Amino acid sequence: MKLLRGSEPVPTVFDLLGDRENDMTAALGFVVSRCPEFAKRLLADIAGHRGDVDGLVVGLQTHTGIGGITDVELVIGNKLAIVIEAKRGPHLPTRGQLKKYVPALRRTGADKQLLVALTNASDAFAADVLDPQVDDVPLVHRSWRRMRQLADASRRHESNQGKRILDEFVACVDGVTQMETRYSNMVYVVSLGGGNLDRWTPSWIDIVAKRRRYFYPAGKRWPDPPNYIAFRYWGKLQSIHHVDGFDLFTNPHDLFPEAPSETWDTHYCFQLGPPIVPPREVKAGNRVVRSNRVWCMLDTLLTCKTVSDALTETERRGNA
């Protein structure tokens, strides 16, 4: 049986909440409160807490009294108090935002107090950006991928009800953070200009063709990292690449030595696999013009005459 809300499928009970940041943190809080093995592993992972979780109180969307609202609070009496600030994407919380949660921690009087930033960024990237403390309160970073790993590791030690909850949670996290793209044959097709960025030596085409790199902003109508990415320039599709990995950066000089050292918004930089070259000329077609970015199935780009035809066939399959 299938559950639809409007025309959209609802694969897990957590998807009934939605896929915004507050919805994801509500799902996390619920799982912590219902799955004791997951709660134990989570507290051990982020706070080194090795005791039991009896008396653990989970708070969601609690007002701090100074203009802040905490996403998730985890408190065990006067032993431990944690505030988790969660972001759906790779963007890290600001120091100013985190400072608003310190009074809420102080009021608990707990012996150990901790701030946690939960995002899609890598721990290495977060370590370069976040301070280790905010007003003398330790700050650590964890990823949604880590939450998934903890859920997987906890599953066999939970009750049957806990197993079902964790299975739904894992499916929800996979869907929202797009971890399932590892198995997807969808290709993100982008356009490259013939020039280069201001004060940069390599052209956009050289960065892809010679360096096997490509970057774009995190968010701002750009997708999470795709499994495949394709490049069109000079009026036709040139190559398709598997995305072997990616870095997050705010200073392009960190990854490209010839680039000027300056501060950007957070960007993804992809490591591209060997090029898959279409066996015949694949022009853009009348549906894909200028700098349009589209999603197409991998095989359609290799069999259709134009990118526009590949887009049309991809849409037809999706509506079948």
Image (cartoon, rainbow, N blue to C red):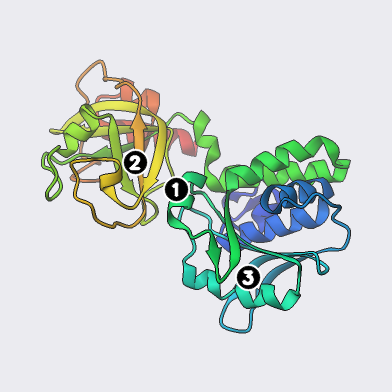
- Callout 3 secondary element: strand
Viewer-side residue, 245 vs 234? 245
| Amino acid found under the numbered disc labelled 1 | Phe
Question: How much space separates mark 2 and mark 3, taking CA atoms?
Answer: 31 Å
Residue displayed at 75% across by 46% down: 41
Q: Is residue 18 left or right of residue 45?
A: left
Tell me where residue 282 sits by quadrant. Answer: top left
* Label 2 – label 1 distance at C-alpha: 12 Å
Query: Total marks drawn?
Result: 3
**Which is nearer the N-term, disc 2 or disc 1?**
1
User: What residue would you read off at disc 3?
Assistant: 70
Left or right, 9 with reference to 181: right
What number is the disc on residue 125? 1
Query: Which is more foreground, mark 2 or mark 1?
Result: 1
Point out residue 288 in the picture as x, y percentages from the top left corner. 24, 41
Please report the residue visible at 68 percent of the width from the left and 61 percent of the height from the top.
26
Residue 238 lies in what quarter of the image? Answer: top left
Give the residue pinned by disc 2: 269
Circles 3, 1 touching at the beta carbon (< 8 Å): no
Please tell me whether residue 123 is drawn above or below residue 202 in the rendered image: below
- What residue is rendered at 48% in x and 45% in y? 124
Query: Is residue 266 left or right of 168 when viewed as pictured?
Result: left
Question: Badge 3: few (under 14), some or many (20 or more) residues near its Cα, within 10 Å?
Answer: many
Badge 1: residue crowd in 10 Å (few <14, some 14–19, many ≥20): some
Q: Which amino acid does label 3 sit on?
A: Thr
Residue at the image point whose x is 19% and y is 50% from the top: 260
Label 3 vs label 1: CA separation? Answer: 23 Å
